[in-house]
Amino acid sequence: MFTGIIEEIGIVEAINSNALTIASSKLLNTIKSGGSISVNGVCLTAISINERSFVVDVVPETLRRTNLGLLKVGASVNLERPLLVSGRLDGHIVQGHVDDTGIVKSISQDGEALLVNIHASSSLMRYIVEKGFIAVDGISLTVVNCDSDGFLITVVPFTMANTILQNRVTEDKVNLEVDLVAKYVESFLLTEK
């Protein structure tokens, strides 16, 4: 489980068919082989660690459901370690199980912040509500407003400077994870009928 509070921007060093090698400077001393790490909001397993990078497994299902298959060597990625039970939940509950991808439709200045409009599938939009939570590339964000076609988020300067949102442009594909509670409520209501 994660919080959506990004701890570091890592750099993709190598890509092969089933693994990514990611350079990290801040998190390496706390990543363990066999442990989880969120990469662009995707919960992955670290399979090896050295003095400058770590390697994570990437399986076909992950490549189908996320934007990780679009990464190139040199790309920046959001990194977050799993939440400690004794830790503070600063963002919101993020599993690292990406529900779908969305497309950045527009980015505009709003004072010191940015407004980012993201298109999402109608099957995902039923879980997204105004002032609700959304994880975009693993970043915990609040929905400003939404309609059947997508949603709008506001990004504060700190988040922009410390995540890969600073590199996003229109038509980029982003990983989306909706609020887990919404999915459970829907499932419960459907089984009660």
Image (spheres, rainbow, N blue to C red):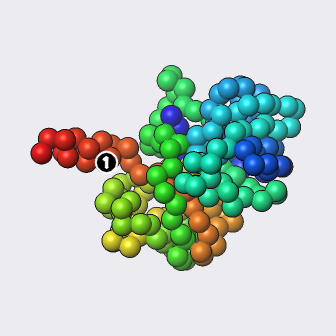
Q: Residue 9: horizontal and vertical position, in percent?
A: 71, 49
The residue at the point 69 percent across, 65 percent down is 167
Residue 163 visible? no
**What element does badge 1 sit on?**
helix
Q: From the viewer's perspective, is residue 107 above or below residue 122?
A: below
Q: From the viewer's perspective, is residue 62 above or below residue 171?
A: above
Q: Residue 142: horizontal and vertical position, in percent?
A: 43, 56
Q: From the viewer's perspective, is residue 58 above or below residue 174?
A: above
Q: Residue 34: horizontal and vertical position, in percent?
A: 68, 26
Q: Residue 124: horizontal and vertical position, in percent?
A: 38, 60
Res 92 quadrant in image: top left
Question: Residue 162 versus residue 4: which sits nearer the camera?
Answer: 4
The residue at the point 44 percent across, 40 percent down is 93
Question: Residue 116 versus residue 147: which sits nearer the camera?
Answer: 147
Residue most toward the top? 86
Answer few, some or many: residues within 10 Å of disc 1's Cα (few below 14, many 20 plus, some between 14 and 19): some
Does residue 45 appear to the left or right of 10 in the view shown?
Answer: left
Residue with the mark numbered 1: 182
